[in-house]
Image: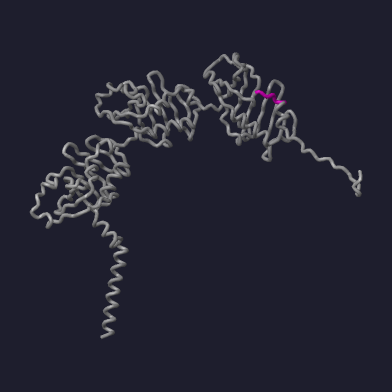
Amino acid sequence: MNSRKTFFLVVLAVIGGSLVVWDYFKGTTTTDREVQSKRVLNLDTKQVTHFELVRSNQTIVLEKTGDNWDIKKPIAVRADFGAVSSTLDELEFAERSRTLTEKDLQGANLASFGLTPARASIKLESKSGPITLLIGNETPLKNALYTQVAGRREICVAPVSLYDRATQNLKALRSRTAIEFTPAAVTRLEIKTADRVVELKKTDSQWMITRPLIARADQNKISELLTGLSEFRVQDFVSEDPKDLHTFHLDEPEREVTVLTGEASKTLLLGRSPTNDADQVYAKLKNADSIFTVAGEPAKKFAVQINDLRDPRVLAVEPASIKSIAMTRGTNKLALQNNGQGWQLTEPVNMPADDAAVNRFLDDLTGTRAKRFVADVTTELQQFGLTTPTAIVTLTGTGTNVLAQLLIGSVDASNEVRFVKRADEPFIYGVETNALDQSPSALAETLAKKPVATPATTNTPPNGTP
């Protein structure tokens, strides 16, 4: 008998252990089931692809495409991912404080719960099938409300916030991004006003101004503009009626900002400020009906002049790429060569140069910035002292590759700037820099490597007497 009892106990232990292991690896523990039993809905929000918020006067329909949510009704616009996720999370984790079973409801007036018809409902579709949550009246203490899953007999007492979610304003679910794009993917930027167009294009990761002139663009400023544009947030939704375009003066906007990513383009129209709020401006996407407002201060950044977007660097050359330097001022010449071991003066004398001093000179030279964009096209070089430049600086890379050649002209009448011009550009810049004012001979003395002084030695007799 003892052996038979032992056998049965062992079998029961094995079965019990197997059930525990099966329960664990199945992924639903007893604790999980207890938590789930307290929830209003058995829902996995990651599986939801469509849901509707239904009330007596309006139905909002949302659908998921890829990783994004879109509002389909009553208007077709992009939804705010965070707002949608927050709504779904609250539905998933909402807990019932009490459950009224079919037995509890015998003899009760079901209309008193506000579920026939429901005050509001939330319809969800997921991979596991459709489900509709009916939302009824508040409980007598007003601290909860009655809900019911369509097709079930039981009624759950749930948080009052579920009604707020089901009846939330359309604006709360809409995306507040004024124009949606990825700044790094943009290949063209266009800023258009009534009288001019500024166009910029990116080639090999470098931005160039292409209209109204061809010039190097300030990479940092363009990046800041695009980042700022992508961060434009809708302050308020004003109208969905295309007829209101004239009312808000967006048929003739102050400016149009267009970004292109590959073949796709998006244009944001920026208009005037509301009469009662100078801190906002009216705006809309060109091919959409929605009219809204955005903050006025960021919008002002697109009221730019062409020179605001130009690269202020005159030479735009990386010091590390320079292998030789030549400077001539009349018959006075300076030449340096980097032989791979360091810098060497070759004119006016042949001797080692001070590498640190040469690098400082190059930093000053390549850091030369335009204090003024003087002229874009001119044939009157004489007035700038550039017909016969006072000095010429040539920077060469590997071999005979000329990286840049700078023509140095005269000083303006106010003695504030010196006129300079790159040989390969039509533009004349006004610069303020000491690097361009020194003579080649003076520079040679500054850049030459100074001999290391050897301390003098004194012979002292062994006894220490002089």
Using the image, determine if residue 435 lies above or below residue 375.
below
Report which quarter residue 340 is drawn in: top right
User: Most extreme residue toward the bottom, as rendered?
Assistant: 1
Q: Is residue 205 visible?
A: yes
- Image point (64%, 25%), residue name: 434
Q: Main secondary structure of the magenta part?
A: loop
Specify whether residue 128 is in view.
no
Q: Position of residue 149 (x, y in %)?
A: 18, 50
Q: Quick check: 283 above or below 340?
A: above
Residue 355 highlighted magenta (yes or no): no
- Quarter of the image for residue 350 reads top right
Q: Residue at 58% of width from left, 34% of height from top?
A: 318
| Quadrant containing the N terminus in the rendered view | bottom left
Range covered by the magenta-colored residues: 437-441
Q: Position of residue 181 (x, y in %)?
A: 37, 35
Nearer to us in this view, 194 or 331: 194
Closer-to-camera residue (298/285): 298
Q: Residue furthest front?
A: 141
Q: Quadrant of the C terminus?
A: top right
Count of labels in the image: 0
- Image quadrant in which you'd find residue 78: top left
Point out residue 274 in the picture as x, y percentages from the top left corner: 32, 23
Name the foreground residue: 107 vs 194: 107
- Colour pattern: one colour
Q: Return the x and y of residue 336 as percentages of the image width and height.
A: 69, 32
Query: Left or right of 179: which side holds 319?
Result: right
